[in-house]
Image: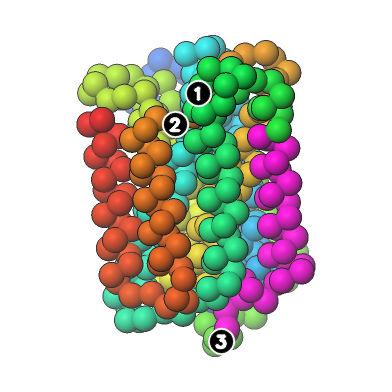
Amino acid sequence: MTTTSPVLPRWTIGMPIAAWLILGAAYALPGYGVLLAFVGIALAGAVFAAVHHAEVVAHRVGEPFGTLVLAVAVTVIEVALIVSVMLTSGPEKAGLARDTVFAAVMIVCNGIVGICLLVGGIRHREQDFQARGAAATLAVLASLSVLTLVMPNFTTTREGPLLSSSQLAFAGVSSLVLYGVFVFVQTVRHRDYFLAATPDESVHAEPPSVTQAMLAGGLLLVCLVAVVLLAKLLSPTVETAVQSIGAPPAVVGIIIAALVLLPEGLAAVRAARADRLQNSLNLALGSALASIGLTIPTVAGVFLWTGQPLVLGINGKETVMLTLTLLVGTLTLSTGRTTILQGVVHLSLFAAYLFLSFAP
């Protein structure tokens, strides 16, 4: 918890209201381009408010339960956004879920983790974390990533990157089971693996009251729903802008993933800056796990029900980037200590991913 007071500032209450008012005006007055600027401002404000409310709830429930709050909440909204866009756009968006999930893994494992390690290293030189918990998280993440994003290219029942109905059902069920077992291990069976070895209680204020936590939880949901609706409202403009600059369609998935991961990213960076790298990694890597473990089963179920095609397999270049990311992540998280070097390495991979996405 990076705040030192349980009191909810006025702006964190007013911002969700303002976001919904702007959202209503944008839907009531379609075609007014000037409203898009206010939509963008409202989107940013709702994101910052969501971060604050998530931290209040996390402080109340404690670790590692607190890190699951924002990760699961944002992933649910991510799933809703992906499904709504794919169902309304038709077969041409069959690869949006794949692009968004892969982008989420790259943004989290290289972008967010890299910034956290760099910011924490600059401020505190070296930082400690539980290597056992990080290794367990990365093992699940590697399994989910390869089984859902790489394996579809090598199956023979149906020509890749598509899966047959039975294969898609298996991918969805196995992803959900892996994520469910991970949550059980993180919160019940081996909870100590995901707690800081030497917690510093001096950085925490007194936990907020139950009333404040419940209010923050309600406002968090209001903010997240506003974020997804505002992002969906901006998505046609984003797609037009991507096409106008000649960027590949996968860039749309990057933008969607960046929008939905922004609250988690900000919370993770603030935790690393406060010398709570364990919480930062729990939140960052947990969001990547939730993105795959919840998105793939839900999307698979929806498209099995509707019978629409769902493209999951990534191409060769992306497979190389995923392999390199998992390898470097394993080396980074194997020692339980990090410096600015690991942060720069991950950020260099993230820069390469972004560059190759725009210039494939």
Can see residue 15?
no
The magenta span reads: 171-199
Distance in Å between CA atoms under marks 1 and 3: 46 Å
The residue drawn where x is 62% and y is 35% is 296
Relative side of 166 to 262, left or right: right
Q: Main secondary structure of the magenta part?
A: helix
Q: Which residue is mark 1?
A: 161
Q: Amino acid at mark 2?
A: Ile
Q: Residues within 10 Å of mark 2 (few under 14, many from 20)?
A: many
Establish if 163 lies above or below 45: above
Q: Are marks 2 and 1 in contact (CB under 8 Å)?
A: yes
Element on which disc 3 rests: loop
Element on which disc 1 rests: loop
The residue drawn where x is 37% and y is 50% is 324
Q: Which residue is mark 2?
A: 314
Position of residue 336 measured from the top left corner of the image (x, y, whole percent) = 47, 76
Whichever of callouts 2 and 1 sits on the residue coming sooner in the sequence is 1
Whichever of callouts 2 and 3 sits on the residue coming sooner in the sequence is 3
Viewer-proximal residue among 24 and 226: 226
